[in-house]
């Protein structure tokens, strides 16, 4: 079973690419479902069929779905929504506004994660294709499993205990509606549905992310940052799709500067993302709408390649034996050492790249070992952990700051 996630800057053609890739998998005889996590759905427009909150057959072996957040809330969020509406109404918010405010930002991403895991675990599908939202929302989507795990492991139990002490006082003094066990129980059950999502999405044999770009400077720059952040959270990018390249057949002199610029950006894409394969798609002469148009686009994009296969091997995170200790190697392509900060807290390695932060739970083999050194070399973060002989001598530094900046060159 394979999970393919397609993302990119808004407007680069990721929906078209995801839809065509899913159709090509289905044409090969694989049971395929394609779903959209983008609140501004356009998957139905690409296939020119009506899609809803449940799988709809689009073609032989192919089903499609567009998430309806409101419908999911009514199904799985009832207790929490009811309590939130009581709070808002207590604060003087009108009923209709309270109902709208009870839709928590980010719920659509959480529901999407639940669907991806459900389809992957069901045994009914060979391929799950995900048309992701633009890159910022995708990064939020893919960081949610780790954030939720941290919240449920640390904050949730404390909040529940505190609620039992404080709620009766607040209810009597201020009349504030306080959450009961049904609300906390609903939240816990909801989180349980997401259990194992991160393990699925970080399984590099089952899940791949594919970046869709146009030959434009801003688009390529954002894709480079996205590649870095995806690697930070442990997700494998196995290909880059260079979409809407000007065809060689265009000979009008007016397009010559554009063709030269496209060639320049394409070279930058090939060199910058190496050794990832670069799949090319020319600018279409007409709108890519409907099964036949998407089938032709997919054939030109993949050629003899099987879109369901892992197109480039590699592990974003590795732990290797080094002397008497170990070295953790994390792929951080395009990361700058000046934007990188590291820290150590108990069993976690704290990594910040720009505005994105990850608390990496260390494997058992590293948890009791103090950090020796850290460096960023050739797009890889290397963090060494002392061996047994060094453990007692350096134990005092295990809980402290590792390094504000990773040393060595890029």
Image: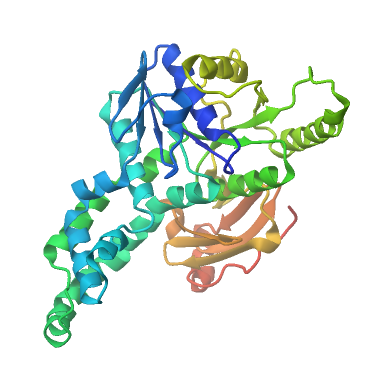
- Image height check: is 309 above or below 137? above
Q: Can residue 369 be seen here?
A: no
Name of the residue lying farthest toward the bottom? 173
- Image height check: is 309 above or below 394? above
Q: Nearer the viewer, residue 38 or 138?
A: 38
Residue at left 45%, top 43%? 40
Q: Nearer the viewer, residue 28 or 379?
A: 28
Name of the residue lying farthest toward the right? 253
Q: Nearer the viewer, residue 239 or 24?
A: 24
User: Is residue 82 found left or right of 281 in the rendered image?
Assistant: left
User: Is residue 80 found left or right of 139 in the rendered image?
Assistant: left
Which colour style is shown?
rainbow
Residue at left 41%, top 41%? 37
Quadrant (top left/top right/bottom left/bottom right) for the N terminus: top left
Task: Count numbered badges in the picture.
Answer: 0
- Image height check: is 31 above or below 46? above
Q: Position of residue 170 (x, y in %)?
A: 17, 83
Q: Position of residue 385 (x, y in %)?
A: 54, 57
Q: Position of residue 405 (x, y in %)?
A: 66, 65
Residue at left 73%, top 33%? 270
- Image height check: is 350 above or below 62? below
Q: Can residue 381 be seen here?
A: yes
Q: Nearer the viewer, residue 364 or 380?
A: 380
Q: Quadrant of residue 125?
A: top left
Residue at left 75%, top 21%? 247
Q: Quadrant of residue 227?
A: top right
């Amino acid at each position: 079973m394979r999970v393919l996630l397609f993302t990119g800057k808004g407007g680069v053609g990721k929906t078209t690419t995801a839809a065509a890739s899913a159709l090509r998998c289905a044409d090969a005889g694989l049971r395929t479902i394609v779903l959209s996590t983008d609140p501004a759905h356009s998957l139905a427009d690409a296939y020119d069929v009506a899609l809803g909150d449940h799988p709809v057959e689009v073609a032989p072996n192919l089903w499609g779905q567009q998430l309806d957040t409101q419908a999911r809330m009514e199904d799985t969020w009832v207790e929490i929504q009811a309590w939130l509406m009581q709070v808002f109404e207590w604060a003087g918010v009108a009923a209709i506004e309270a109902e709208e405010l009870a839709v928590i930002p980010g719920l659509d991403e959480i529901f999407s994660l639940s669907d991806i895991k459900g389809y992957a675990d069901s045994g009914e599908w060979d391929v799950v294709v995900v048309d992701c939202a633009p890159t910022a929302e995708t990064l939020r989507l893919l960081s949610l499993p780790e954030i939720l795990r941290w919240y449920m492991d640390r904050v949730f139990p404390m909040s529940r205990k505190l609620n039992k002490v404080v709620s009766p006082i607040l209810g009597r003094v201020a009349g504030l509606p306080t959450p009961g066990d049904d609300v906390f129980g609903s939240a816990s059950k909801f989180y349980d549905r997401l259990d194992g999502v991160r393990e699925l999405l970080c399984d590099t044999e089952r899940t791949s992310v594919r970046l869709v770009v146009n030959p434009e400077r801003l688009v390529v720059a954002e894709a480079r940052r996205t590649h870095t952040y995806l690697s930070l959270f442990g997700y494998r990018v196995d290909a880059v799709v260079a979409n809407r390249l000007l065809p060689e057949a265009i000979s009008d002199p007016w397009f010559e500067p554009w063709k030269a610029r496209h060639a320049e950006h394409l070279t930058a894409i090939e060199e910058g993302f190496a050794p990832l394969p670069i799949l090319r798609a020319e600018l279409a002469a007409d709108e890519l709408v409907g099964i036949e148009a998407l089938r032709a686009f997919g054939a030109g994009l993949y050629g003899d390649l099987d879109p369901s296969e892992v197109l480039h091997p590699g592990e974003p995170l590795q732990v290797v034996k080094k002397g008497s200790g170990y070295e953790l190697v994390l792929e951080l392509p395009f990361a700058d050492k000046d934007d990188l900060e590291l820290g150590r807290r108990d069993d976690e390695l704290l990594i910040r790249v720009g505005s994105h932060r990850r608390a990496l739970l260390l494997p058992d083999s590293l948890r009791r070992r103090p950090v020796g050194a850290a460096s960023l070399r050739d797009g890889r973060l290397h963090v060494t952990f002392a061996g047994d002989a060094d453990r007692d001598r350096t134990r005092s530094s295990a809980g402290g700051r590792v390094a504000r900046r990773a040393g060595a060159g890029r």
